[in-house]
Image (tube, rainbow, N blue to C red):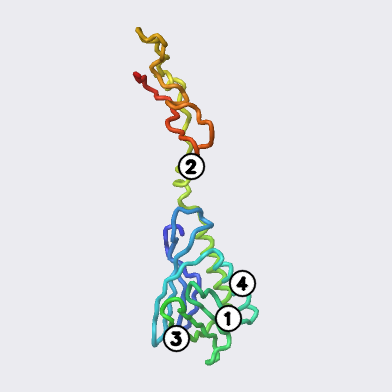
């Protein structure tokens, strides 16, 4: 997220001090392509009796599932979000105290379960949608693009003048009746391999830039 500032994806709270908050704190892997980043977040549970804190990671699919959960809540249905690899969050619209209840169950970690009754105001699902849109807006903002472009920058081809230091082929040395040259042939010291590399050695296959006396 730009600037790594925290923003609340979920904030369910009342005037009695009960709240369940999912706070997105930043990116898990800054610099990776934006739409594939994993978001780091904290689950904050506060009541007059207990308070707790859990860490979790949110994938793009988790945000889509939360959006679908908000549709169900707006239609008067209870929902379950996350679970398996992360703490499970359930929202019961008709709790025992005549108000919604938020249940946070940390199955992968502490195995603890906390039920928080929250007297929510009318239109609270619309507020959660605005928070979701804000998280998406910030998390999809360009970040690290300049670094990525620098990594992908193609270096210009060398100028033709850079090839002028190549030396011409020398003349045969005196006293050498075969007229052997002092540079290795393009195919190297060995003859061409008559078969696959798994059966024949391939060895040196380059031509030294400097003259080598044989």
Check disc 4 and report the residue beneath it. Answer: 68
Mark 4 vs mark 3, foreground winner is: 4
Outermost residue toward the right in this view: 75
Give above or below for 169 relative to 57: above
Tag 3 secondary structure: loop
Disc 4 vs disc 1: which is toward the camera? 4
Image marks 1 and 3: residues in contact by CB distance under 8 Å: no
Q: Earlier in the sequence, mark 2 or mark 4?
A: 4
Distance between mark 2 and mark 4 Cα atoms? 38 Å
Mark 3 or 2: the one toward you: 2
The residue where tag 3 is placed is 16
First in residue order: circle 4 vs circle 1: 4
Label 2, residues with CA under 10 Å away: few <14, some 14-19, many ≥20? few
Q: Secondary structure at mark 1?
A: loop
Reading the chain from its start, which is encountered first: label 1 or label 3? 3
**Coordinates of residue 28 in the picture (x, y in percent):** 44, 61
Give the distance between the C-alpha atoms of the residues marked 4 and 1, in whole angstroms.
19 Å
Label 1: how many Cα within 10 Å (few below 14, some 14–19, many 20+): few
Q: Is residue 82 above or below residue 184?
A: below
At mark 2, the secondary structure is helix
Q: Residue at x 44, y 46 (%)?
A: 147
- Residue 81 drawn at (x, y percent): 55, 75
The first of marks 4 and 3 along the sequence is 3
Instruction: Give the alpha-carbon distance from disc 4 to disc 3, as whole Å.
Output: 29 Å
Task: Read off the residue under disc 2.
Answer: 152
- Distance from the alpha carbon under mark 3 to that under mark 2: 54 Å
Q: Which residue in the protein does label 1 denote?
A: 122
């Amino acid at each position: 997220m730009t600037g790594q500032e925290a923003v609340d994806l979920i904030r369910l709270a009342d005037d009695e001090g009960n709240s369940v908050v999912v706070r997105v704190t930043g990116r898990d892997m800054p610099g990776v392509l934006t739409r594939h980043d994993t978001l780091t977040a904290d689950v904050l549970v506060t009541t007059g009796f207990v308070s707790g804190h859990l860490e979790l990671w949110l994938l793009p699919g988790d945000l889509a599932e939360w959006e679908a959960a908000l549709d169900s809540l707006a239609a008067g249905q209870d929902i379950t979000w996350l679970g398996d690899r992360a703490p499970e969050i359930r929202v019961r619209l008709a709790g025992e105290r005549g108000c919604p209840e938020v249940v946070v169950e940390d199955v992968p970690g502490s195995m603890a379960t906390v039920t928080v009754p929250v007297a929510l105001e009318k239109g609270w699902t619309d507020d959660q949608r605005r928070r979701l849109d804000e998280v998406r807006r910030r998390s999809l903002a360009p970040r690290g693009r300049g670094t990525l472009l620098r990594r992908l920058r193609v270096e210009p081809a060398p100028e033709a003048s850079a090839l002028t230091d190549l030396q011409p082929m020398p003349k045969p040395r005196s006293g050498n009746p075969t007229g052997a040259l002092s540079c290795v042939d393009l195919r190297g010291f060995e003859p061409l391999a008559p078969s696959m590399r798994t059966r024949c050695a391939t060895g040196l296959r380059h031509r030294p830039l400097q003259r080598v006396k044989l």
